[in-house]
Image: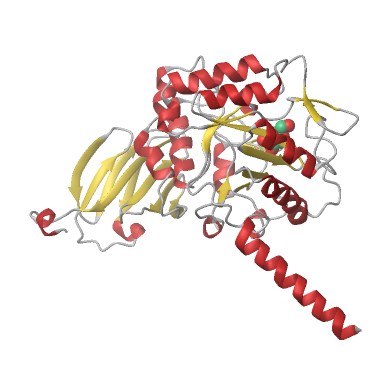
Amino acid sequence: MLLMGCLACAASAVALADFRAESLAANGLAPTPPMGWNSWNRFGCNISETIIRSQADALVSSGMRDAGYVYVVVDDCWHGERDAAGNIHADPARFPSGIKALADYVHGKGLKFGIYSDVGDLTCQHRPGSRGHEYQDARQYADWGVDYLKYDWCDAGTLDAASAYETMARALRATGRPIVFSICEWGKNKPWLWAAASGGNLWRTTEDIFDGWEGKQGISLSVLEILDAQPGLEGYAGPGHWNDPDMLEVGNGGMTEDEYRAHFSLWAMLAAPLMAGNDLTSMSDAVRRILTNREVIAVDQDRLGVEGHRAARNGDLEVWVRPLEDGARAVVLLNRGHQSAHAMLEWSMLRLPDYLPLHIRDLWRHANRPDATSHLAIELPPTSAVMLRVVPARPAGAAHDRR
Ligand code: GLA
Protein backbone atom coordinates (compact mmCIF):
# COMPACT_ATOMS: atom_id res chain seq x y z
CA MET A 1 0.00 0.00 0.00
CA LEU A 2 2.70 2.34 1.07
CA LEU A 3 4.73 1.61 -2.04
CA MET A 4 1.70 2.13 -4.29
CA GLY A 5 0.95 5.40 -2.57
CA CYS A 6 4.48 6.57 -3.22
CA LEU A 7 4.36 5.54 -6.87
CA ALA A 8 1.12 7.45 -7.41
CA CYS A 9 2.66 10.36 -5.65
CA ALA A 10 5.71 10.31 -7.87
CA ALA A 11 3.62 9.95 -11.03
CA SER A 12 1.46 12.93 -10.20
CA ALA A 13 4.51 14.98 -9.28
CA VAL A 14 6.02 14.19 -12.68
CA ALA A 15 2.75 15.02 -14.44
CA LEU A 16 2.55 18.31 -12.59
CA ALA A 17 6.15 19.13 -13.44
CA ASP A 18 5.49 18.35 -17.12
CA PHE A 19 2.36 20.46 -17.12
CA ARG A 20 4.26 23.33 -15.61
CA ALA A 21 7.26 23.08 -17.86
CA GLU A 22 5.39 22.56 -21.11
CA SER A 23 2.18 24.44 -20.73
CA LEU A 24 2.33 27.17 -18.19
CA ALA A 25 5.84 28.51 -18.13
CA ALA A 26 5.69 29.02 -21.85
CA ASN A 27 2.23 30.08 -23.02
CA GLY A 28 4.11 31.72 -25.84
CA LEU A 29 3.02 35.21 -24.81
CA ALA A 30 5.05 38.27 -23.83
CA PRO A 31 8.32 37.38 -25.57
CA THR A 32 9.22 40.98 -24.69
CA PRO A 33 7.76 42.92 -21.73
CA PRO A 34 4.10 43.87 -22.36
CA MET A 35 3.41 47.52 -23.16
CA GLY A 36 0.18 49.41 -22.84
CA TRP A 37 -1.92 51.65 -20.62
CA ASN A 38 -3.67 50.87 -17.32
CA SER A 39 -6.41 52.91 -15.66
CA TRP A 40 -5.31 52.64 -12.01
CA ASN A 41 -2.50 55.15 -11.42
CA ARG A 42 -4.42 58.11 -12.81
CA PHE A 43 -8.09 57.22 -12.47
CA GLY A 44 -8.36 54.73 -9.59
CA CYS A 45 -12.02 53.70 -9.27
CA ASN A 46 -13.20 56.72 -11.21
CA ILE A 47 -13.42 54.86 -14.52
CA SER A 48 -16.09 54.44 -17.17
CA GLU A 49 -16.40 53.14 -20.69
CA THR A 50 -16.17 56.73 -21.95
CA ILE A 51 -12.83 57.23 -20.22
CA ILE A 52 -11.42 53.94 -21.46
CA ARG A 53 -12.52 54.64 -25.02
CA SER A 54 -10.96 58.07 -25.04
CA GLN A 55 -7.70 56.67 -23.64
CA ALA A 56 -7.70 54.07 -26.42
CA ASP A 57 -8.27 56.86 -28.96
CA ALA A 58 -5.37 58.82 -27.48
CA LEU A 59 -3.06 55.79 -27.55
CA VAL A 60 -3.52 55.83 -31.29
CA SER A 61 -3.49 59.60 -31.96
CA SER A 62 -0.43 60.20 -29.74
CA GLY A 63 1.62 57.63 -31.66
CA MET A 64 1.92 55.43 -28.58
CA ARG A 65 0.26 52.42 -30.17
CA ASP A 66 2.71 52.58 -33.02
CA ALA A 67 5.56 52.87 -30.52
CA GLY A 68 4.44 49.53 -29.01
CA TYR A 69 1.80 50.31 -26.35
CA VAL A 70 -0.95 47.89 -27.32
CA TYR A 71 -2.69 46.69 -24.14
CA VAL A 72 -5.52 48.82 -22.74
CA VAL A 73 -6.09 47.44 -19.25
CA VAL A 74 -9.12 48.30 -17.13
CA ASP A 75 -8.01 47.90 -13.51
CA ASP A 76 -10.15 47.54 -10.37
CA CYS A 77 -13.75 48.82 -10.15
CA TRP A 78 -15.23 47.82 -13.52
CA HIS A 79 -17.32 45.19 -11.75
CA GLY A 80 -21.01 45.07 -11.08
CA GLU A 81 -22.57 42.05 -9.41
CA ARG A 82 -22.61 38.34 -10.03
CA ASP A 83 -25.98 37.04 -11.24
CA ALA A 84 -27.80 34.01 -9.82
CA ALA A 85 -25.71 31.71 -12.02
CA GLY A 86 -22.52 33.29 -10.72
CA ASN A 87 -21.69 35.16 -13.90
CA ILE A 88 -19.88 38.45 -13.35
CA HIS A 89 -21.28 41.59 -14.96
CA ALA A 90 -19.84 45.06 -15.47
CA ASP A 91 -21.06 48.01 -13.40
CA PRO A 92 -24.15 49.01 -15.43
CA ALA A 93 -23.82 52.69 -14.57
CA ARG A 94 -20.18 53.09 -15.58
CA PHE A 95 -20.07 50.48 -18.35
CA PRO A 96 -23.61 50.51 -19.77
CA SER A 97 -22.54 48.97 -23.08
CA GLY A 98 -20.83 46.08 -21.33
CA ILE A 99 -17.29 44.79 -21.47
CA LYS A 100 -17.64 42.95 -24.78
CA ALA A 101 -18.56 46.17 -26.58
CA LEU A 102 -15.62 47.94 -24.96
CA ALA A 103 -13.21 45.17 -25.93
CA ASP A 104 -14.57 45.30 -29.50
CA TYR A 105 -13.98 49.06 -29.59
CA VAL A 106 -10.42 48.65 -28.34
CA HIS A 107 -9.74 45.85 -30.82
CA GLY A 108 -11.13 48.03 -33.59
CA LYS A 109 -8.31 50.48 -32.89
CA GLY A 110 -5.65 47.83 -33.46
CA LEU A 111 -5.16 47.47 -29.69
CA LYS A 112 -5.59 44.63 -27.19
CA PHE A 113 -7.86 44.58 -24.18
CA GLY A 114 -7.07 43.74 -20.57
CA ILE A 115 -9.04 43.40 -17.39
CA TYR A 116 -8.48 42.98 -13.64
CA SER A 117 -9.56 40.50 -10.99
CA ASP A 118 -8.34 39.07 -7.71
CA VAL A 119 -7.66 35.70 -6.07
CA GLY A 120 -9.95 36.50 -3.12
CA ASP A 121 -13.71 36.88 -2.69
CA LEU A 122 -13.17 40.62 -2.95
CA THR A 123 -10.77 42.81 -4.93
CA CYS A 124 -8.72 45.50 -3.23
CA GLN A 125 -11.64 47.92 -3.77
CA HIS A 126 -14.17 45.35 -2.47
CA ARG A 127 -15.58 44.37 -5.83
CA PRO A 128 -16.29 40.69 -6.54
CA GLY A 129 -13.06 38.68 -6.84
CA SER A 130 -12.68 35.38 -8.66
CA ARG A 131 -12.27 32.96 -5.77
CA GLY A 132 -14.32 29.85 -6.53
CA HIS A 133 -15.28 31.32 -9.93
CA GLU A 134 -11.90 31.02 -11.66
CA TYR A 135 -12.99 28.86 -14.60
CA GLN A 136 -16.30 30.67 -14.99
CA ASP A 137 -14.59 34.07 -15.02
CA ALA A 138 -11.83 32.96 -17.37
CA ARG A 139 -14.47 31.68 -19.80
CA GLN A 140 -16.35 34.94 -19.49
CA TYR A 141 -13.22 37.00 -20.14
CA ALA A 142 -12.41 34.90 -23.20
CA ASP A 143 -15.97 35.38 -24.50
CA TRP A 144 -15.58 39.13 -24.03
CA GLY A 145 -12.31 39.10 -25.99
CA VAL A 146 -9.93 39.73 -23.12
CA ASP A 147 -6.23 39.49 -24.02
CA TYR A 148 -4.63 40.29 -20.66
CA LEU A 149 -5.58 39.60 -17.04
CA LYS A 150 -4.07 41.40 -14.06
CA TYR A 151 -4.78 39.23 -11.03
CA ASP A 152 -4.46 40.83 -7.59
CA TRP A 153 -3.79 39.45 -4.11
CA CYS A 154 -6.28 41.22 -1.81
CA ASP A 155 -8.49 39.14 0.52
CA ALA A 156 -6.15 36.18 -0.04
CA GLY A 157 -6.40 34.95 3.55
CA THR A 158 -4.34 31.82 3.97
CA LEU A 159 -4.31 30.89 0.28
CA ASP A 160 -1.07 29.48 -1.06
CA ALA A 161 0.05 32.03 -3.62
CA ALA A 162 1.65 29.69 -6.14
CA SER A 163 -1.44 27.41 -6.18
CA ALA A 164 -3.95 30.24 -6.28
CA TYR A 165 -2.25 31.81 -9.29
CA GLU A 166 -1.78 28.45 -10.95
CA THR A 167 -5.52 27.78 -10.68
CA MET A 168 -6.28 30.92 -12.65
CA ALA A 169 -3.49 30.22 -15.14
CA ARG A 170 -5.03 26.81 -15.81
CA ALA A 171 -8.47 28.37 -16.16
CA LEU A 172 -7.15 30.89 -18.68
CA ARG A 173 -5.38 28.16 -20.59
CA ALA A 174 -8.55 26.06 -20.67
CA THR A 175 -10.34 28.83 -22.59
CA GLY A 176 -8.03 28.33 -25.56
CA ARG A 177 -7.66 32.11 -25.93
CA PRO A 178 -4.16 33.58 -25.58
CA ILE A 179 -4.34 35.75 -22.45
CA VAL A 180 -1.28 37.38 -20.89
CA PHE A 181 -1.30 36.61 -17.17
CA SER A 182 -0.09 39.42 -14.91
CA ILE A 183 0.51 38.32 -11.32
CA CYS A 184 0.01 41.17 -8.87
CA GLU A 185 1.08 39.73 -5.53
CA TRP A 186 3.33 42.64 -4.53
CA GLY A 187 6.40 40.45 -3.96
CA LYS A 188 4.97 39.12 -0.68
CA ASN A 189 5.78 35.46 -1.33
CA LYS A 190 8.86 35.95 -3.52
CA PRO A 191 6.94 35.39 -6.77
CA TRP A 192 10.14 35.43 -8.80
CA LEU A 193 10.70 31.91 -7.41
CA TRP A 194 7.39 30.41 -8.56
CA ALA A 195 5.38 32.81 -10.72
CA ALA A 196 6.70 31.64 -14.10
CA ALA A 197 6.00 28.01 -13.15
CA SER A 198 2.52 29.06 -12.01
CA GLY A 199 1.79 30.48 -15.45
CA GLY A 200 2.63 34.15 -14.94
CA ASN A 201 4.03 36.23 -17.76
CA LEU A 202 4.92 38.99 -15.32
CA TRP A 203 4.83 39.43 -11.56
CA ARG A 204 4.91 42.47 -9.37
CA THR A 205 8.03 42.60 -7.20
CA THR A 206 6.87 45.24 -4.69
CA GLU A 207 3.99 47.16 -3.16
CA ASP A 208 2.34 49.85 -5.30
CA ILE A 209 4.24 52.71 -6.85
CA PHE A 210 3.30 56.33 -6.11
CA ASP A 211 4.10 59.36 -8.22
CA GLY A 212 7.27 60.45 -6.41
CA TRP A 213 11.05 60.25 -6.71
CA GLU A 214 12.01 59.06 -3.23
CA GLY A 215 10.61 57.83 0.07
CA LYS A 216 7.36 56.09 0.92
CA GLN A 217 3.74 57.14 1.13
CA GLY A 218 2.09 54.71 3.54
CA ILE A 219 2.99 51.36 2.03
CA SER A 220 3.38 52.81 -1.47
CA LEU A 221 6.86 53.23 -2.86
CA SER A 222 8.65 55.89 -4.89
CA VAL A 223 10.70 55.24 -7.99
CA LEU A 224 13.95 54.97 -6.00
CA GLU A 225 12.43 52.69 -3.32
CA ILE A 226 11.18 50.35 -6.03
CA LEU A 227 14.51 50.51 -7.84
CA ASP A 228 16.35 49.47 -4.68
CA ALA A 229 14.19 46.34 -4.39
CA GLN A 230 15.26 45.03 -7.80
CA PRO A 231 18.95 44.05 -7.48
CA GLY A 232 19.18 40.28 -7.09
CA LEU A 233 15.99 39.59 -9.07
CA GLU A 234 17.56 40.05 -12.54
CA GLY A 235 18.22 36.36 -13.09
CA TYR A 236 14.54 35.43 -12.78
CA ALA A 237 13.37 37.49 -15.74
CA GLY A 238 13.50 36.46 -19.38
CA PRO A 239 11.36 36.13 -22.49
CA GLY A 240 7.80 35.27 -21.47
CA HIS A 241 8.34 35.90 -17.75
CA TRP A 242 9.22 39.33 -16.40
CA ASN A 243 9.79 41.09 -13.10
CA ASP A 244 7.22 43.88 -12.84
CA PRO A 245 8.35 46.92 -10.79
CA ASP A 246 4.81 48.35 -11.25
CA MET A 247 3.24 50.68 -13.77
CA LEU A 248 4.59 54.01 -14.94
CA GLU A 249 3.82 57.31 -13.25
CA VAL A 250 5.27 59.36 -16.12
CA GLY A 251 3.04 62.39 -16.67
CA ASN A 252 0.99 62.22 -13.47
CA GLY A 253 2.45 65.46 -12.14
CA GLY A 254 4.38 64.47 -9.02
CA MET A 255 7.87 64.44 -10.52
CA THR A 256 10.05 66.70 -12.67
CA GLU A 257 10.66 66.02 -16.33
CA ASP A 258 14.20 64.84 -15.51
CA GLU A 259 12.80 62.45 -12.91
CA TYR A 260 10.24 61.05 -15.34
CA ARG A 261 13.00 60.55 -17.91
CA ALA A 262 15.04 58.72 -15.28
CA HIS A 263 12.01 56.62 -14.20
CA PHE A 264 11.38 55.61 -17.81
CA SER A 265 15.08 54.92 -18.49
CA LEU A 266 15.41 52.73 -15.40
CA TRP A 267 12.25 50.75 -16.15
CA ALA A 268 13.65 50.06 -19.63
CA MET A 269 16.89 48.86 -18.04
CA LEU A 270 14.83 46.55 -15.79
CA ALA A 271 13.08 45.01 -18.81
CA ALA A 272 9.91 46.17 -17.08
CA PRO A 273 6.43 45.97 -18.56
CA LEU A 274 5.79 49.53 -19.77
CA MET A 275 2.23 50.28 -18.71
CA ALA A 276 1.60 54.00 -18.99
CA GLY A 277 -0.55 55.26 -16.11
CA ASN A 278 -1.29 58.87 -17.03
CA ASP A 279 -4.18 60.63 -18.74
CA LEU A 280 -3.23 60.26 -22.38
CA THR A 281 -5.90 62.69 -23.56
CA SER A 282 -4.26 65.68 -21.88
CA MET A 283 -0.56 64.85 -21.69
CA SER A 284 2.00 67.49 -22.58
CA ASP A 285 4.29 67.14 -25.54
CA ALA A 286 7.22 66.62 -23.18
CA VAL A 287 5.47 63.65 -21.54
CA ARG A 288 4.52 62.22 -24.91
CA ARG A 289 8.12 62.49 -26.05
CA ILE A 290 9.29 60.57 -22.97
CA LEU A 291 6.76 57.78 -23.42
CA THR A 292 7.43 57.44 -27.14
CA ASN A 293 11.23 57.60 -27.09
CA ARG A 294 11.83 54.71 -29.45
CA GLU A 295 15.51 54.39 -28.63
CA VAL A 296 14.68 53.81 -24.96
CA ILE A 297 11.75 51.55 -25.80
CA ALA A 298 14.08 49.47 -27.98
CA VAL A 299 16.21 48.78 -24.90
CA ASP A 300 13.16 47.71 -22.90
CA GLN A 301 12.01 45.48 -25.74
CA ASP A 302 15.41 44.00 -26.54
CA ARG A 303 14.82 40.42 -27.60
CA LEU A 304 17.70 38.95 -25.66
CA GLY A 305 15.52 39.63 -22.63
CA VAL A 306 18.35 39.98 -20.11
CA GLU A 307 17.38 42.37 -17.32
CA GLY A 308 19.88 45.11 -16.47
CA HIS A 309 21.76 45.26 -13.17
CA ARG A 310 23.32 47.87 -10.93
CA ALA A 311 27.00 47.73 -11.91
CA ALA A 312 28.34 50.44 -9.60
CA ARG A 313 27.18 52.69 -6.78
CA ASN A 314 28.95 55.58 -5.12
CA GLY A 315 26.83 57.79 -2.86
CA ASP A 316 24.04 59.22 -4.98
CA LEU A 317 25.59 58.06 -8.24
CA GLU A 318 24.79 54.72 -9.83
CA VAL A 319 25.61 52.94 -13.05
CA TRP A 320 23.14 50.43 -14.48
CA VAL A 321 24.10 48.14 -17.36
CA ARG A 322 22.02 45.94 -19.62
CA PRO A 323 23.44 43.65 -22.32
CA LEU A 324 21.60 43.77 -25.64
CA GLU A 325 21.01 41.25 -28.36
CA ASP A 326 23.39 42.80 -30.88
CA GLY A 327 26.34 42.89 -28.46
CA ALA A 328 25.81 46.52 -27.46
CA ARG A 329 25.17 47.53 -23.85
CA ALA A 330 22.57 49.95 -22.56
CA VAL A 331 23.90 52.11 -19.73
CA VAL A 332 22.14 54.44 -17.31
CA LEU A 333 24.10 56.91 -15.21
CA LEU A 334 21.81 57.92 -12.36
CA ASN A 335 22.07 60.84 -9.97
CA ARG A 336 19.67 60.15 -7.11
CA GLY A 337 20.67 63.26 -5.20
CA HIS A 338 19.60 66.88 -5.16
CA GLN A 339 22.97 68.36 -6.21
CA SER A 340 24.51 68.26 -9.67
CA ALA A 341 27.16 65.57 -9.82
CA HIS A 342 30.11 64.52 -11.85
CA ALA A 343 29.62 60.90 -12.93
CA MET A 344 32.27 58.60 -14.33
CA LEU A 345 31.56 55.57 -16.47
CA GLU A 346 34.56 53.27 -16.54
CA TRP A 347 34.80 50.47 -19.08
CA SER A 348 35.56 48.05 -16.23
CA MET A 349 31.95 48.63 -15.08
CA LEU A 350 30.90 47.30 -18.48
CA ARG A 351 33.37 44.41 -18.19
CA LEU A 352 35.16 45.73 -21.24
CA PRO A 353 38.90 46.40 -21.56
CA ASP A 354 40.09 49.98 -21.11
CA TYR A 355 41.73 50.22 -24.52
CA LEU A 356 38.57 49.36 -26.43
CA PRO A 357 37.18 52.36 -28.36
CA LEU A 358 33.44 52.62 -27.77
CA HIS A 359 30.85 54.22 -29.97
CA ILE A 360 28.43 56.09 -27.68
CA ARG A 361 24.85 56.99 -28.45
CA ASP A 362 22.86 59.28 -26.14
CA LEU A 363 19.30 57.93 -26.15
CA TRP A 364 17.68 61.12 -24.85
CA ARG A 365 19.59 63.58 -26.99
CA HIS A 366 19.23 61.25 -29.98
CA ALA A 367 22.84 62.01 -30.87
CA ASN A 368 26.23 60.33 -30.80
CA ARG A 369 28.94 61.42 -28.43
CA PRO A 370 32.56 61.22 -29.61
CA ASP A 371 34.00 57.68 -29.49
CA ALA A 372 35.99 57.13 -26.30
CA THR A 373 38.36 54.69 -24.63
CA SER A 374 38.62 53.69 -20.97
CA HIS A 375 36.04 56.05 -19.45
CA LEU A 376 33.45 58.74 -19.97
CA ALA A 377 32.84 61.69 -17.66
CA ILE A 378 29.34 63.16 -17.58
CA GLU A 379 27.82 66.00 -15.60
CA LEU A 380 24.40 65.04 -14.24
CA PRO A 381 21.77 67.53 -13.08
CA PRO A 382 20.04 66.82 -9.75
CA THR A 383 17.67 63.81 -9.70
CA SER A 384 18.27 62.81 -13.29
CA ALA A 385 19.70 60.12 -15.51
CA VAL A 386 21.60 59.88 -18.76
CA MET A 387 20.92 56.85 -20.92
CA LEU A 388 23.45 55.56 -23.43
CA ARG A 389 23.93 52.72 -25.83
CA VAL A 390 27.57 51.73 -26.17
CA VAL A 391 29.12 49.37 -28.67
CA PRO A 392 32.73 48.67 -29.63
CA ALA A 393 33.60 51.08 -32.42
CA ARG A 394 34.19 49.25 -35.67
CA PRO A 395 37.64 49.84 -37.15
CA ALA A 396 37.52 51.71 -40.50
CA GLY A 397 36.72 49.29 -43.33
CA ALA A 398 35.35 46.62 -41.01
CA ALA A 399 31.89 47.05 -42.47
CA HIS A 400 33.17 45.56 -45.73
CA ASP A 401 34.45 42.48 -43.93
CA ARG A 402 31.02 41.58 -42.56
CA ARG A 403 28.95 39.04 -44.37
C1 GLA B 1 -3.59 46.82 -5.69
C2 GLA B 1 -2.67 46.73 -6.90
C3 GLA B 1 -2.76 48.02 -7.69
C4 GLA B 1 -4.19 48.23 -8.15
C5 GLA B 1 -5.11 48.25 -6.94
C6 GLA B 1 -6.57 48.26 -7.33
O1 GLA B 1 -3.17 47.80 -4.79
O2 GLA B 1 -1.35 46.49 -6.50
O3 GLA B 1 -1.90 47.98 -8.82
O4 GLA B 1 -4.56 47.21 -9.04
O5 GLA B 1 -4.91 47.11 -6.11
O6 GLA B 1 -7.41 48.19 -6.25
Nearest the camera: 320 or 329?
Answer: 329
Q: Residue at x 44, y 18 (%)?
A: 61
Within the image, what quadrant is residue 78 found in? top right
Q: Is residue 272 visible?
A: yes
In screen coordinates, is 113 left or right of 12? left
State ligand 1's quadrant: top right
Place of residue 144 in the rendered image (x, y in percent of width and height, measured from the top left) = 67, 31
Place of residue 278 in the rendered image (x, y in percent of width and height, measured from the top left) = 55, 24
In screen coordinates, is 107 left or right of 99? left
Nearest the camera: 77 or 315?
Answer: 77
Q: Residue at x 85, y 38 (%)?
A: 121
In screen coordinates, is 280 left or right of 80? left
Q: Is residue 341 visible?
A: no
Place of residue 140 in the rendered image (x, y in percent of width and height, measured from the top left) = 74, 35
On-image quarter of the N terminus: bottom right
On-image quarter of the C terminus: bottom left
Q: Residue at x 46, y 48 (%)?
A: 315
